[in-house]
Each structure stands twice: as C-alpha cells, then as structure tokens.
Image (cartoon, rainbow, N blue to C red):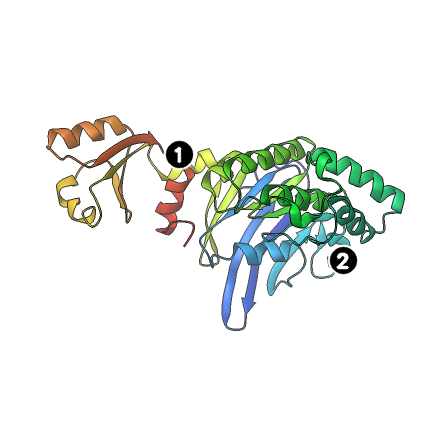
Amino acid sequence: MCDTAGMTSRPVVSARALVKRFGGFTAVDGIDVQIAPGEAFGFLGPNGAGKTSTMRMIGCVSPVTDGELRIFGLDAATNGRTIRGRIGVVPQLDQLDSELTVVENLLIYGRYFDLSRAQCRAKADELIDFVQLDEKRMSKVDSLSGGQKRRVSIARSLVNDPELLLLDEPTTGLDPQARHVLWDRLYQLKERGATQVITTHFMDEAEQLCDRLVVMDGGLIVAEGSPQSLIREHVRREVLEVRFGYGRNQEQLPALDGVGSRIEVLPDRLLIYDDDGEAALSELHRREIVPDSALVRRSSLEDVFLKLTGRTLVE
C-alpha cells in the first residue's frame, strides 16, 4: 500500500506481504512498507494495531512469520546479526543501567559493538555533547529527570553510528519542554541523513517529525502518505468543535443534521468537519443552537485517525 514513487535508491526497509502471528492470533496481516534512505517514517495505530510487532520485526528481534522483509537489502531472516549491528534502537521504556553514570552507560554499550576503549571514549564525548548533557556526564542515571534519561537513551542508540534508528514512543511521559528538546535532536539527526522509524501516541509529534507515515488498524495498513496529504485526503479543511455538556452531545445530533459534511461524536465534544468552520458555526447560530463552547480550528492528523479507526489513539 505504500507509495514508493520518488524513491531513487534502494529502500532501507522493504516489506512485502509481511505477516506476524502469535499462535492463532495474527498481529500483522500482510502489509507492504517501503522506507527510503534519510526518511523519517511513522507507524500510527491504536493499541493492538500491529505497529510494535512490525517494529520488532524490522529490528530483527522478532522473526517474520510470512512474507519478505529486507533491511539494507539484506534478508532479515538470515542476516539478523549483521542488520542489528547497523541499527540503533530507542525503546519505549528506558533500559539504562541506573547505578552507572551517563558516560559509563555509553562506554559499556559501545563495547557491545567491538569499539575500542579509545573509540568508546571519543564517541561518548561526542554524543554527550550532542544531547546537551555535559553537566550530567558523571551523574548516575537514577538521579536524572525523565527527559534527561530519554536523551541518554538516544545517545546510547547512536554509539554504533547507525544507518537506521528505531524510536518506539520516544517522548512518552515527558513534559512539553522535554519533548521539544528531543524533537530538536531528532531534527538534527535527520539533517545528518539518518533514517528514522517512529511509533508515537502524539499526533502533533507525528506531524512534526514524519515525512511519511502509515496508519495501522487490526494488523492492516488503512492509510499511507505524508501528514498533510492524509489530512487533505481524509478530512475537510476545518473542524468546528462544540461541547454541550456531559451526556448531552449525542442528543444534539438531530438538531445538527445537515451542518458540515460529517460529524464525529466523542465523549466530551462533537467534531463538525467542513471546508469553512466559521460558516458551520454561523449555521448553528441561525438555528439558535447554543453550545457550552465552540472552537474553529484547522483539521489535524488526529482527525484523520479518528475517521479511519473510530478511536482515540490512547485507549
């Protein structure tokens, strides 16, 4: 389903009819994915959609049940060790040694890739500077904030100069300021040519970081494209958000018949999609419908997600 137009060189990741089963359960049901060199590519989907299973197969830590998966042109089934040596992974939960210092975490991890002690030291210095943790280099990880730990995880994932970086929910649990610091580091990595594969629960993060993404649901890819192309294709230009109070949103639907092109009912509000949100709001006023609150905004990737899956991302 992925559009490979514009790929002028061999894809870093190429999956065809990719399947992952756990006993009688099919987590990934025959998907096609092509990821170009230097691309920031996202997997979005509700819990259980299959995105984590896909990421684990790309990382060569979970075997493919059926289909073909090639990383750097190599068969993931037979070249897992070689592939793992060329990728970096930032897991959803930090897997740092909390009793060691920041620099010790990087030095020890570098040895796993057969780097010499001198190479490990030089790489640790470079990466600590890159993630802006010079003042914390001798601090134990256990004393760091959540955002600082995530920066150490990113630094550690870069020890082997990976050609492909896998980021699983990279900013989960961070405050907005820490998220933006991490976004800046990821922008810089992209400018250096690193290919990134990202799963995230944050729609704004996907819009900011991803050149292209897929939305998964039930083990299938239900949409693919750039964030802006998905918005143009699946929802109208603007959204009118209206709230009528707890338990009263659903009962307002008959009175709103014909307003906008489509209405999405959420527990706390109604979303009215239209090319002109102000015109939709004027129609409410004409009908003497008075919500508790009303807001007109541009459509977002979250609106696409709601339309395609019928659910909010975090469940």
Q: Residue at x 50, y 36 (%)?
A: 176
Residue 124 in view in this figure:
yes
Given the current orientation, which residue lies at the most extreme bottom position?
23
- Residue 165: x %, y % from top left: 66, 45
Q: Could you say which quadrant of the image residue 55 lies in?
A: bottom right
Whole-angstrom CA distance, mark 2 to mark 1, is 41 Å
Look at the picture and state if 146 lies above or below 67. above
Look at the picture and state if 229 lies above or below 168. above
Residue 232 is marked as 1
Under mark 1, the amino acid is Arg
Number of on-image labels: 2
Q: Earlier in the sequence, mark 2 or mark 1?
A: 2
Q: Could you say which quadrant of the image residue 17 lies in?
A: bottom right
Q: Could you say which quadrant of the image residue 149 lies in?
A: top right
Q: Residue at x 70, y 61 (%)?
A: 77
Left/right placement of residue 118 relative to residue 194 reads right
Residue at label 2? 81
Identify the secondary structure beneath mark 1.
helix
Q: Nearer the viewer, residue 71 or 98?
A: 98
Under mark 2, the amino acid is Arg
